[in-house]
């Protein structure tokens, strides 16, 4: 009970999750902007049978109805508006209302063609929904700068209740990630290709999963590397939740999970799925790691710009981070 109500936890991680999820939404929408009409807009008549749900895979969400009857021009402006909302969410401007509007907009567009989506879409919308109940703008946001500049302390909820809502949503998001990893690992462990260490080889022979053929060939032509990587994936997914209970094991499993998703993004052309998972893995990274990385980044940035000192505001913010 004390953990739940006395203070908000993982505020740096929540801010990182906001930034990375915003990049994921931006990337997903911008990368599909040229074919938006035929995939999500007025030209998506091919998806009507799926949307009607007659085959059992149609969505039960209402947001797709928002764009169902929009013409090409209006849909373009709607599409661009959601991109702007994603950018505002990324930079942390009015995150409460912007996050809700962005989530509705993202679901309304993506679920117009649910058959072309992947599991990254699912975890992204679940994670975004839970982030709405969390304090995601305490760091690296325009909201934080505005509050610091004006000295704002106004609260809508009592402090203990606000803490409880944030921490309950944090626990729910952590549980969601752990369950995803565990059941993904269980499904893999039952598969023959995963058991004999060759499962990663076959999808990387498909054209759709070979954005960089040379890299794919370098990886798949080393049998031992393929086998070891295959087993590492299963072990990390099955053991992710258990590893979080030990400080050293937590660091190792999070580092491996990050490398795994980076490899999926580069080698298998699934950047937005990987980024969605990385966004919510970020809540498990300790505040000390974020503070250390931020300090290193500031030093590197100053060196790059030829600056030798920090502004008073920057120094004050860094001191607050340590507290």
Image (cartoon, helix red, strand yellow):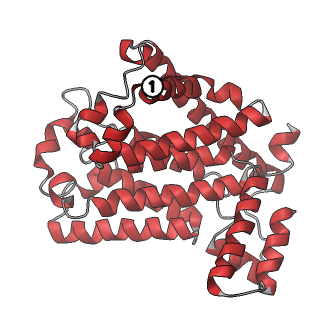
- Find residue 257 and report its image quarter: top right
Residue 294 falls left or right of residue 257 = right
Name the residue rendered at 31%, 50% in the picture.
110
Q: Measured along the vertical axis of the image, is residue 188 above or below residue 90?
A: above
For disc 1, the neighbor class at 10 Å (few under 14, some 14 to 19, many from 20) is: few
The residue lying at 54 percent from left, 43 percent from top is 259
Question: Residue at the location (25% across, 57% down)?
Answer: 67
Quarter of the picture containing the N terminus is: top right
Res 85 → quadrant: bottom left
Instruction: Give the percent coordinates (x, y) of residue 59.
Output: 31, 37
Q: Is residue 270 left or right of residue 125?
A: left
Residue 220 appears anywhere in the view = yes
Is 136 situated above or below 210? below
* Place of residue 34 in the rendered image (x, y in percent of width and height, measured from the top left): 20, 64
* Closer to us: 125 or 152: 125
Quadrant of the frame with the C terminus: bottom right
User: Helix, strand, or loop for circle 1?
Assistant: helix
Q: Would you say residue 125 is visible in this rendering?
A: no
Residue placed most toward the observer, 126 or 241: 241
Residue in the image at 63% along x and 29% along y: 240
Is residue 88 toward the left or the right of residue 107 in the image? Answer: right
Whole-percent x, y for residue 289 in the image: 74, 54
Residue 274 drawn at (x, y percent):
45, 45
Q: Relative to 151, say whether 294 is above or below.
A: above
Q: Name the residue tied to disc 1.
A: 224
């Amino acid at each position: 009970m004390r953990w739940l109500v006395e203070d908000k936890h993982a505020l740096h991680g929540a801010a990182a999750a906001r930034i990375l999820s915003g990049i994921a939404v931006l990337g997903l929408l911008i990368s599909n902007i040229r074919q938006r009409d035929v995939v999500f807009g007025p030209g998506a008549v091919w998806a009507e049978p799926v949307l009607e749900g007659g085959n059992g895979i149609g969505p039960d969400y209402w947001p797709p109805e928002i764009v169902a009857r929009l013409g090409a021009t209006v849909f373009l402006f709607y599409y661009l508006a959601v991109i702007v909302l994603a950018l505002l969410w990324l930079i942390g401007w009015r995150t409460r209302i912007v996050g809700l509007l962005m989530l509705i907009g993202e679901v309304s567009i993506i679920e117009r063609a649910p058959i072309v989506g992947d599991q990254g879409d699912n975890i992204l919308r679940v994670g975004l929904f839970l982030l709405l109940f969390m304090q995601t703008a305490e760091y690296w946001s325009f909201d934080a700068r505005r509050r610091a500049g004006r000295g704002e302390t106004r609260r809508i909820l009592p402090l203990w209740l606000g803490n409880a809502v944030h921490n309950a949503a944090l626990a729910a998001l952590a549980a969601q990630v752990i369950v995803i990893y565990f059941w993904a690992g269980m499904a893999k462990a039952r598969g023959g290709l995963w058991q004999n260490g060759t499962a990663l080889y076959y999808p990387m022979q498909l054209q759709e999963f070979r954005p960089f053929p040379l890299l794919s060939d370098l990886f798949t032509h080393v049998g031992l590397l393929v086998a070891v990587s295959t087993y590492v994936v299963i072990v990390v997914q099955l053991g992710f939740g258990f590893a979080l209970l030990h400080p050293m094991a937590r660091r190792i499993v999070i580092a491996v999970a990050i490398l795994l998703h980076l490899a999926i993004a580069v080698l298998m052309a699934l950047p937005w799925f990987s980024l969605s998972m990385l966004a919510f893995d970020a809540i498990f990274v300790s505040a000390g790691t974020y503070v250390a990385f931020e300090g290193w980044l500031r030093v590197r940035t100053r060196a790059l710009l030829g600056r030798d000192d920090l502004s008073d505001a920057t120094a004050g913010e860094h001191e607050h981070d340590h507290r």
